[in-house]
Image (spheres, grey):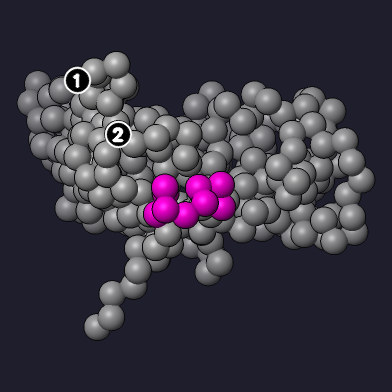
Amino acid sequence: MKISRPILEVADLCIVRDRTVILRDVDWRVRRGEHWVILGANGSGKTSLLSALTGYLMPTSGEISVLGETYGESDWRELRKQIGLVSSSIRQMMSDAETALETVASSKYAMIDFWGRLSRTDKITAMRLLKQIECEYLADREWRVLSQGERQRVLIGRALMAKPRVLILDEPCAGLDPAAREHFLQFLQRLGAQKNSPTLIFVTHHVEEIMPVFSHVLILKNGAVLAAGEKMTALTVDNLAAAFAAKLKLQLADGRYAMDVSSKRSTVV
């Protein structure tokens, strides 16, 4: 059986700044058809790993490859186009007066606060993406009146405009109320199940946000890989207890996880 080339590959990645080790000996491979969760406590290295994947934080040693092309050997600006990113930093830069259609379409020009004229082709493509993310009804609504959940969906549409092979969602549920969070997670479940979906990489602190569509988990602790692999193998009570330095109980029901850190000992139900 032929093994497909990894979509994303990290080998022996180390990042050191001012004699502080940020990431050390990180090995990670993402293959076609997999959707990953990156899980870890604050300070575990999640943000630094994302910055390295998107070319904003240069490795001290090791390699990062996208579709077989390696940062440093290929044009990193072109490689970065293969990775879409949805994060709070992007959300905060959007113009209040920009419509959802403009927000999505302007990604083609790498612009925020779009000031040009959209072509008919741009509008058609942006509307198709709004439909894909179940937001076509928002096309003419300005950013200022969108809810947090709607904004996150529109930013996903914006990222998809560049046709990335990998879509990174950096704590996309932060700031959402419980109902909005669940609606957004159900949307991600449907998005990841689509035939033409890019590989999803979902970054979170919360096991409750891990939807059934996510097949694999990478757990970081102190800048190193604590566990990586298929969800049922990597997402164990022992790994989570070590990652969060806490005694806990892990529950699994109907494909969804729940973690209780108030229990006296670490158990799995």
Q: Residue furthest left?
A: 265
Q: Is residue 183 left or right of residue 139?
A: left
Quadrant into which the N terminus falls:
bottom left
Q: Is residue 98 above or below residue 68?
A: above
Q: Nearer the viewer, residue 56 or 115?
A: 56
- At a point 75% along the width and 46% down the height, the residue shown is 109
Residue 247 point in image, percent of width and height: 12, 24
CA–CA distance in space, label 2 to label 1: 39 Å
Q: Estimate the x, y position of residue 66 in percent, counting from the top left.
A: 42, 56
Name the residue rendered at 22%, 45% in the picture: 12
The answer to whether the residue labelled 2 contacts the one labelled 1, judged by CB atoms less than 8 Å apart, is no
Q: Please, is residue 1 above or below residue 196 in the view?
A: below
Residue at image mark 1: 262
Is residue 256 located in the magenta-colored stretch of the structure?
no
Q: Considering depth in this image, is 114 or 190 the residue closer to the camera? A: 114
Residue marked by disc 2: 60
Between disc 2 and disc 1, the foreground one is 2
Residue name at image x 28 percent, y 75 percent: 3
Instruction: Give the mark, 2 or 1, whose residue is nearer the N terminus.
Output: 2
Amino acid under disc 2: Thr
- Is residue 87 visible to the viewer in this orientation of the structure? yes
Viewer-proximal residue among 32 and 132: 32
* Residue 211 visible in this rendered orientation of the protein: no
- The magenta segment is 70-78
Residue 76: image x %, image y %? 50, 47
